[in-house]
């Protein structure tokens, strides 16, 4: 349970009367993926602007920062289709911090191209940053620091060698791994040994990138935690097919003898798409994982909690049953539900790692069995206000129907912004919203934020786009669209200081500034590793 794993019981002056139920801690937070941070170099990074964002969260009374998966992205630049469930995205490495480390020259940054300020041009960023990072690696080697890298590799033996080899082979052959020469695709020991010898420098380069990501992320997380901010991360249920995960662990996925998926994951037609969502990810052989005591999943959770404080399990209903579509299908309409591991998996994880703070993404086609698993595991579910205004007073996403053990969102990364959502509503739907809010709806983003904070839900989370009151042009993702997603970035000048004060007042008014977070923020000194804000 989140209250058990995040906070101690209230004592002393905070104690309640003996005959009253103790109040659960309440939190408020902002959803912003690090790629959306401002900055001069085309994409958000783990440097000064990230530290400035942590300062903003503290000033606004926020105790949560929700992010999307941190892994290195592949086709489409989606953080939900990464090359590894364990690795970090090198594009997030701060070049400014590399300058401080003596691995990049300041003059190199001065020669950076003119990047867009409000969107990520991934192609341009990747071309510039990869060249910069490889020069940084050469300087790292010249500084005689390879032994430092060896220690990092030794500490991450469970996933790093396979990932680095996979990425090095991709430099040589950019096709999906199942199209590589058969000995490499099927992981023949002799072929792998020869590849390690041939690609030794590239393997070290990718280990270097992971070491810099790990160092920068760890320091940023320490700074956030010392400021009373916990980081809420994300575990997608299925990894991408063209990933080190699937290549290195082929036996736990439903693949044909050539390494291609036999069936792929998705969801049936729903609110987001009339033909469903065809994700294309391979699905698990849960019986094999069970025989292995779910070792791969245990290690995945272990790694996730090295990086973040709380985990949101994306597509939680897939642990009860997942929608599996025959490989080669054009849409997700003609699939079938296939049972998942249920409580067996979470019992194994808890036996190995203890009780963990987890949020269940229980949206979509939810059955009684999904709710039963969520509650048996002790995970709070999600409530999305944008889904609530059908006119049905018993709709589960209307706040008067909530239980306290839930996480309330105005919208998620898959939704339109609240301003964009409201603009697209029918007249009848707008009337439903107005009737419920009792507002003139002149500032719908603020209205929904206040509604989320007012609710009994233990956490209230708001996309940064809603804080800034932005329209559909700032949408992060449109499910079913293959291109043009994940690129939104904000600019500091969009953030009115009065808006920061309003958020803080809102969090204080509705009891969403935990006393423990306040005392931590007041008592902790700033870490030596913190870069100056710019």
Image: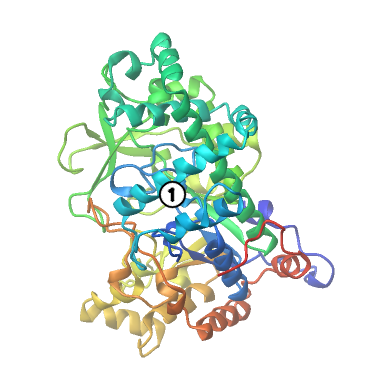
Residue at disc 1, secondary structure: helix
Res 89 visible: no
Q: Which residue lies furthest to the front in this view?
A: 107
- The one of 83 and 140 positioned closer to us in this rendering: 140
- The colour scheme applied to this rendered structure is rainbow
Which residue is at a point 40% across and 49% down the rendered structure image?
129
Q: How crowded is mark 1: few (under 14 residues within 10 Å), some or many (20 or more)?
A: many
Task: Depth check: give the residue in front, 283 or 100.
Answer: 100
Q: Is residue 493 left or right of residue 64?
A: left
Residue 495, compared with residue 74, is above or below; it is below
Q: Name the residue under label 1.
A: 91
Residue at 29% across / 57% down in the picture?
A: 485
Residue 245 visible in rendering: yes
The image position of residue 70, as x and y in percent, is 47, 47
Front residue of this view, candidates 38 and 316: 38
Q: Residue at x 21, y 77 (%)?
A: 426
């Amino acid at each position: 349970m989140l209250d058990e794993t995040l906070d101690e019981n209230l004592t002393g002056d905070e104690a309640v009367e003996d005959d009253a139920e103790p109040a659960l801690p309440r939190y408020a937070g902002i959803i912003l993926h690090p790629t959306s941070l401002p900055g001069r170099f085309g994409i958000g990074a783990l440097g000064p602007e990230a530290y400035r964002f942590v300062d903003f969260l503290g000033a606004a009374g926020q105790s949560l920062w929700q992010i999307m998966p941190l892994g290195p992205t592949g086709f489409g630049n989606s953080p939900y289709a990464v090359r590894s469930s364990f690795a970090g995205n090198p594009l997030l490495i701060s070049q400014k911090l590399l300058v401080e480390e003596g691995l990049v020259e300041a003059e190199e940054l001065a020669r950076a191209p003119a990047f867009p300020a409000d969107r990520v041009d991934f192609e341009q960023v990747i071309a510039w940053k990869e060249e910069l990072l490889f020069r940084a690696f050469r300087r790292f080697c010249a500084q005689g620091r390879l032994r430092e890298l060896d220690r990092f590799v030794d500490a991450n033996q469970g996933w790093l060698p396979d990932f680095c080899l996979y990425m090095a082979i991709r430099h040589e052959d950019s096709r999906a791994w199942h199209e590589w020469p058969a000995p490499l695709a099927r992981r023949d020991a002799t072929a792998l040994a020869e590849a390690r010898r041939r690609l030794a420098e590239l393997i070290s380069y990718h280990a270097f990138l992971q070491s810099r990501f790990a160092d920068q992320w760890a320091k940023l997380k320490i700074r956030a935690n010392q400021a009373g901010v916990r980081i809420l991360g994300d575990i997608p249920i299925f990894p991408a097919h063209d990933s080190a995960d699937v290549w290195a662990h082929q036996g736990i996925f439903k693949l044909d003898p050539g390494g291609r998926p036999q069936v792929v994951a998705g969801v049936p037609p729903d609110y987001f798409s009339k033909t469903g969502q065809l994700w294309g990810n391979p699905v698990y052989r849960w019986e094999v994982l069970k025989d292995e005591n779910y070792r791969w999943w245990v290690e995945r959770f272990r790694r996730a909690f090295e990086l973040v404080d709380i985990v949101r399990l994306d597509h939680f209903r897939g642990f009860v049953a997942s929608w599996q579509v025959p490989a080669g299908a054009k849409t997700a309409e003609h699939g079938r539900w296939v049972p998942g591991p249920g409580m067996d998996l979470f019992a194994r994880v808890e036996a190995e790692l203890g009780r963990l703070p987890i949020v269940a993404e229980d949206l979509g086609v939810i059955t009684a069995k999904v709710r039963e698993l969520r509650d048996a595991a002790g995970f709070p579910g999600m409530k999305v206000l944008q889904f609530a205004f059908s006119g049905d007073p018993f709709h589960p996403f209307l706040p008067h129907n909530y239980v306290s053990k839930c996480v309330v969102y105005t919208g998620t990364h898959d939704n339109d912004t609240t301003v964009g959502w409201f603009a697209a509503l029918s007249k009848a739907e707008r009337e439903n919203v107005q009737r419920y809010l009792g507002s003139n709806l002149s500032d719908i983003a603020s209205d929904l934020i206040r509604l989320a904070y007012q609710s009994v839900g233990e956490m209230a989370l708001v996309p940064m786009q809603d804080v800034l009151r932005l329209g559909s042009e700032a949408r992060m993702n449109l499910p079913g669209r293959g291109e043009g997603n994940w690129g939104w970035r904000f600019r500091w000048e969009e953030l009115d200081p009065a808006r920061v004060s309003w958020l803080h007042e809102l969090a204080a008014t509705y009891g969403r500034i935990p006393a423990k977070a306040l005392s931590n923020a007041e008592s902790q000194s700033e870490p030596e590793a913190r870069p100056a804000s710019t």
